[in-house]
Image: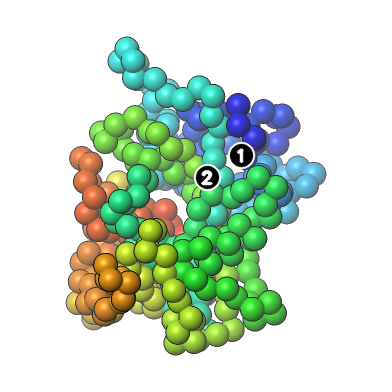
Amino acid sequence: MAAARVLLSGRPESVSFAQSVCGLLGAGPGLGPWPTYCGLKRGQLVLSDRPFPGASARLPLQRPPFCPFPALDQQPRAPGAELPTNRGVDLAVAVVLQSSDQTVLLTRRTRTLNVSPNLWVPPGGHVEPDEELLDGGLRELWEESGLQLPQGQFFWVPLGLWESAYPPRLSWGLPKYHHIILYLLVISQESQQQLQARIQPNPREVSALMWLGRDVAAAVAATEDGTETPRHLPQDLPPSVLAVELEENGGARPLVLPTSTLLRTTPATADSKERVSTGTKFALRLWLQHLGR
């Protein structure tokens, strides 16, 4: 078994790959989120539905309505359709970087990545063993965007937790990856223009980037994946947003991206159409709540 990354308070062993973390913490059939006590330790995350010694935060935990892990407990699997038995649930961190203008940075993952290709997400990735969670987030921000934030010119707060699977739906196939993603809000004292001037995206991981303001972010966050009822969208929503797309020769060019692209939801059958990930919509909702406080 790999080094423990996601654990439940009072249990020495890590959560196994096939177990629903939300379910183990008492999540019911609703959509959540569920308040969860967290111990943000070096290289691992300890979770509980009640306070425990070492808990440093109480965060909302959520999963998509179509999360495959609850369903896997309720239906037989075909012979040979097995899930990994020697892996736990991996821990990832994603940085919601806010400029002093109150915009946030999203990057589009390249089409060649094995996990979640062509999706718009905040910079993020795996936490290394013995790595502080903030350090892991800032490292991923630097690796993907080239941005290093000067000490003393930002502060941060944990936003929430997301249970993620890939493929994201059983109709796409059995899950091969299982993560808990910790979203960190990192608030820079620099403007969007100042931050943008220093960005040097990694073309192996990032194919485009953009800064979202509150209005478009609210519309994106309101497009719920897995629900049948469409949300009311503002009439004055801009038809497009401006992004920057990387070129094969190493340069970059402006990209006028239809807002409708950002409002797409996760389809029932596998495809790699450009859209905002479901977890990112959750993070944007939490960001907007934070701004409103």
Identify the residue at image location x=25%, y=33%. Answer: 171
Q: Vertical placement of 93 versus 171: above or below?
A: below
Instruction: Measure the C-alpha gap from mark 2 to mark 1.
Output: 7 Å
Q: Which residue is mark 1?
A: 6
Q: Helix, strand or loop at disc 2?
A: strand
Q: Nearer the viewer, residue 230 or 166?
A: 166
Query: Disc 2 or 1, which lies upstream in sequence?
Result: 1
In this rendering, would 131 be left or right of 147? right
Residue 125 falls left or right of residue 202 = right
With 122 as the anchor, is 136 left or right in this view? Answer: right
Q: Nearer the viewer, residue 64 or 86?
A: 86
Residue at the far front in the pictured view? 249
From the image, tell me which residue sits under label 2. 180
Report the label total. Answer: 2
**What residue is shown at x 26% (from left), y 80% (from top)?**
254
What is the quadrant of the C terminus in the image? bottom right
